[in-house]
Each structure stands twice: as C-alpha cells, then as structure tokens.
Amino acid sequence: MTNINEPKPESDLPTGISKPAQRALSGAGYSRLEQFTTISEAEILKLHGMGPKALGIIRQALADKGLSFADKS
C-alpha cells in the first residue's frame, strides 16, 4: 500500500540518459518530466551535453505518460 504523504522522488527522468545529458538537464534545472511540456525540443538540444539519443529517450518517456514537448511556435 502506498502512502499518499510520501514525498515525490527528486527526479523522475528516465534511466538510460547519458551522464553528460543528465548533467546538462540538472544544471538547467530540469528534474521532472512535466517540466518538458513547457519547452520545445529545440530548446533542450541547445544544452551542452544533450543529443538526439537523450532527446528520444525523454520524448518516449513523455509519450508513455501522455505528455509531449511544447510546440515549436
């Protein structure tokens, strides 16, 4: 049985993201999948250490939760 009052984990980012990409996201303040719904993929790719593989992992994790990156416009 889960406790409703349990704190959320510090980060819910998917596993499999490279260490440089993890550091880039952490340094930019991203630790929750929901945060990516307010920014575009292009904005994430501007972070030093982020690449297409990490972006794809995040995109899939968002899709699994019924979420997506913000529109480019």
Image (cartoon, rainbow, N blue to C red):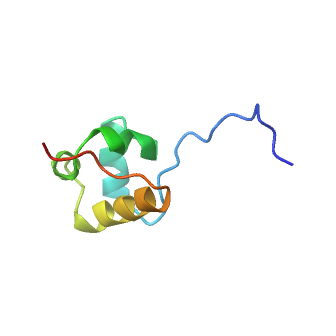
Q: Residue at x 56, y 39 (%)?
A: 10
Foreground of the two, 34 or 7: 34
Q: Residue 47, image x and y in percent? A: 20, 47
Q: Is residue 10 left or right of residue 42?
A: right
Q: Residue at x 76, y 31 (%)?
A: 5
Q: Is residue 35 left or right of residue 42?
A: right
Q: Residue 66, image x and y in percent? A: 46, 55
Q: Quadrant of residue 25?
A: top left
Instruction: Tell how many labels.
Output: 0
Q: Quadrant of residue 38?
A: top left
Q: Is residue 23 left or right of residue 31?
A: left
Q: Residue at x 44, y 47 (%)?
A: 33
Q: Quadrant of residue 4?
A: top right
Foreground of the two, 20 or 53: 53
Question: Does the image show residue 18?
Answer: no
Foreground of the two, 70 or 1: 70
